Amino acid sequence: WRLARELEPAAREVLVATALVLFVYRAVPGPGAGAIWWEIDVLRFDAAFISKLSLIASALTLAGMFIFRRYMAEKSIAQIIVMLTFAGTALGLPYVGMFYGLHHWTEALTGGMVDARFIALIDTALESPLGQIAMIPMLAWIANSAPPQLKATYFAVMASFTNLALSAAQLGTEYLNKVFIVTRQVTDHATGAILVRADYHEVGDLLISAALIGLLLPLAAVGIVKLFKLRTA
């Protein structure tokens, strides 16, 4: 509120609307540990392969900033969020498909080439460039429009605001994993007895619910901004 007081009414409106849309987009929960356990135990993604996916994601995120720089310069943050929301939902569908056996069908169709790992690699390569795009217009707006003596403060506050949204996403992820119970096998090392049996039956519902929330919440935030005729960066 104190930072917003330093702005003209029109600029204040842009700041509040942009922060709201970005917060909701960043606060969307994911499928969490339940889906990771399923990938490791059912799809057989080992630690080395998961590390490769993470490395690809990090590298292509940097590439995406250059690839989409013109698009980000020409579009508002609301339009960018809508694009990212639809793209993110579409790119989450292959994992839903693999829960229902998509990779078995593609593997049989291609002689074993397009298996679960191949699908995961392609999906990560397509999704990664979209990773940090949403934040760039906000940072550019601060650089251009924030009061000169407060630019560093605006950057710091928006970074903290983003971290708060990510914490909200983690809480949402935890609640999703309490609604859709996924358990990994736990064995007593001394006796070999199974203490908890693996149960991945609800992974499909978990993935679908996370995808729907990820689609509807950002679109609702953009809709509210449009309804009140607010402008975003």
Image (cartoon, rainbow, N blue to C red):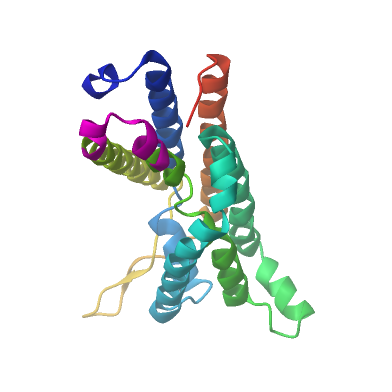
The residue located at (52%, 59%) in the rendering is 66
Residue 223 against residue 100 in the figure, above or below: above
Q: Is residue 27 visible?
A: no
| Main secondary structure along the magenta-highlighted residues | helix
Q: Is residue 151 magenta?
A: yes
The residue located at (46%, 31%) in the rendering is 21
Relative to 154, 117 lies left or right = right
Most distant residue in the front direction: 148
Q: Which is more toward the observer, 36 or 160?
A: 160
Task: Determine the image quadrant of residue 135.
Answer: top left
Q: Is residue 225 visible?
A: yes
Task: Determine the image quadrant of residue 227.
Answer: top right
The x, y position of residue 12, in whole percent, is 37, 20
The residue located at (43%, 63%) in the rendering is 36
Relative to 119, 156 lies left or right = left
In the rendered image, the quadrant that contains the N terminus is top left
Most distant residue in the right direction: 109
Relative to 56, 90 lies left or right = right
The residue located at (49%, 28%) in the rendering is 232
Q: Is residue 114 magenta?
A: no
Task: Determine the image quadrant of residue 212.
Answer: top right
The x, y position of residue 121, in whole percent, is 56, 72
Q: What's the magenta region?
A: 140-152
Q: Which is more toward the observer, 140 or 193?
A: 140
